[in-house]
Amino acid sequence: MTYSVSQLLTKDITLQPLEIKGWVRTFRANRFIALNDGSTINNIQCVVDFENTDEALLKRITTGAAVHIKGNLVESQGKGQKVEIQVTSIEILGDSDPDEYPIQPKKHTFEFLRENAHLRTRTNTFSAVMRLRSSLSFAVHKYFNENGFYNMHTPIVTGSDAEGAGEMFSVSALDPKNPPLTKDGNIDYKEDFFGKETNLTVSGQLEAETYAMSLGKVYTFGPTFRAENSNTSRHLAEFWMIEPEVAFMDLAGNMDLAEDFMKSVLSYVLKYNREDLEFLEQRLLDEEKTKPQVERSELSLIDKIKFVVDNNFKRVTYTEAIDILKNSKPNKKKKFNYIIEEWGADLQSEHERFLVEKHFKCPVILFDYPANIKAFYMRLNEDGKTVRAMDILFPGIGEMVGGSQREERLDVLIEKMKVLNIDEKELWWYLDLRKYGTAVHSGFGLGFERLVMFATGMGNIKDVIPYPRTPQNAEF
């Protein structure tokens, strides 16, 4: 019977013939194969009877080679593992030239591994990260399925800019060297494939709202795109967004949903990905030893996740937060890179982390933000200057979730769109929701890669997505 490495290391199977397939991590003393098949971070040791094995075959057992092993599982004689396989036969399924194979059994920089992203999941770090990514993805769908949400697939090609940011990738089938022009000399998009100017989506929210106003509770989980020319450790041009939308739910209900959701998905990986988390936690501890004491995290990786799961999220208005920050020591002593001087300032990551890590010492939900720093679709409060927006702040990362109660009043929404020069004709269908059976509704957005960064402790967003798309980089 063929088993996975994970099965052999977790089940009580001894002294019986078995088969296993995987990739050689190391082969030492012409005898001991460390075999991994991706099912677990751990390798299983396979002991070769080298005296009775063809020498030509032994030479082909190299790092990276794919092998098919038959043998018996026995108690291990050495330290480091409970069981090992005594090999009775070995077949090389795919050779790996040791002089050319990039992923050698030594420490590689993350930059080097990004250049070899097609092979980097053969390392412990990236196999652990991608197993956690998979588990988090499953936990997201599991949570919404168990709570009465319907999954919808929103368009990737769109004619609207949901965020109003304008940083979108154009989608066109016109000849770039000779596009049709209007009388004014502009490109005539009426001649294009879709008959209008179209882009890759930055969010599925607006379309999700339409379905929430008939199906009640929906969510999207799909790719989104931003043409922001930024090559920082926190930006990608292509990333995945989780966006639930719920009819008849106000801002308080939205905060309840987001808190419960975050605790649920993180609890899932604490339960089912313990070995990967423990490995990544140790990797992080080793990395932090090289940093000055002031830059080290007060919490280990697993403790940081538990910090979110085990604590009630503190709910604070933007106005209260500004007062706290204005009067804080880092602000008064000008230790912040961005000094808080007045109400209306857009909070930076350093401010968000101060509130979570230093002041409240628990996850924080900020709400009721100034209208002029938030999107047009957010519900205007009675004071006329704030909107029913909310952001959830986590330790080590700052903003994790952004959401709001949506503006359900037609006249108010039209007025806000006029002020921001948003064309009513482009969003006629969105306005229709406010004409026919409008009601209070809310939702939030969560960048999936940011969640994976938090759960894995990885410091660069390029290392938590299989093939990162960034300025000047679309390899693989």
Image: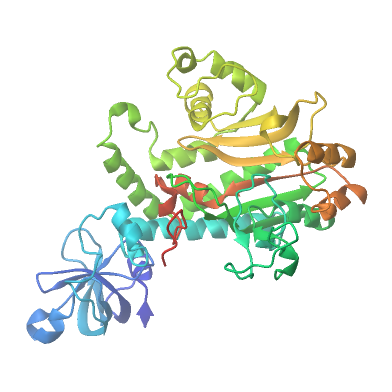
Q: Could you tell whether 183 is left or right of 80 in the image?
A: right
Visual colour scheme: rainbow
Q: Which residue is drawn at 70% across and 49% down?
A: 162
Q: Report the residue at 29% width, 57% height from top.
A: 112
Q: 217 or 415, which is in the foreground? A: 415
The quadrant in which the N terminus is found is bottom left
Q: Could you tell me which residue is drawn at 85 percent across and 49 percent down?
A: 431
Marks counted in the figure total 0
- Seen in the picture, residue 94 relative to 392 is either above or below; the reply is below
Q: Quadrant of residue 285?
A: top left
User: Residue 260: which quarter of the image?
Assistant: top right
Q: Looking at the picture, how far across and down is residue 326, in whole percent?
A: 55, 15
Percent position of residue 454, x then y: 47, 44
Of residues 305 and 292, the one nearer the viewer is 292
The image shows residue 189, relative to residue 235, as above or below, that is below
Whether residue 404 is situated above or below residue 323 in the rendered picture: below
Residue 225 location (% of width, % of height):
58, 55
> Relative to residue 177, is residue 462 drawn left or right?
left
Residue at the (61%, 17%) spot, across then down: 342
Q: Could you tell me which quadrant the C terminus lies in?
A: bottom left
Is residue 437 visible in this depiction of the protein?
no
Q: Can residue 350 be seen in this view?
A: yes
The residue most toward the left is 51
x%, y% of residue 310?
A: 53, 37
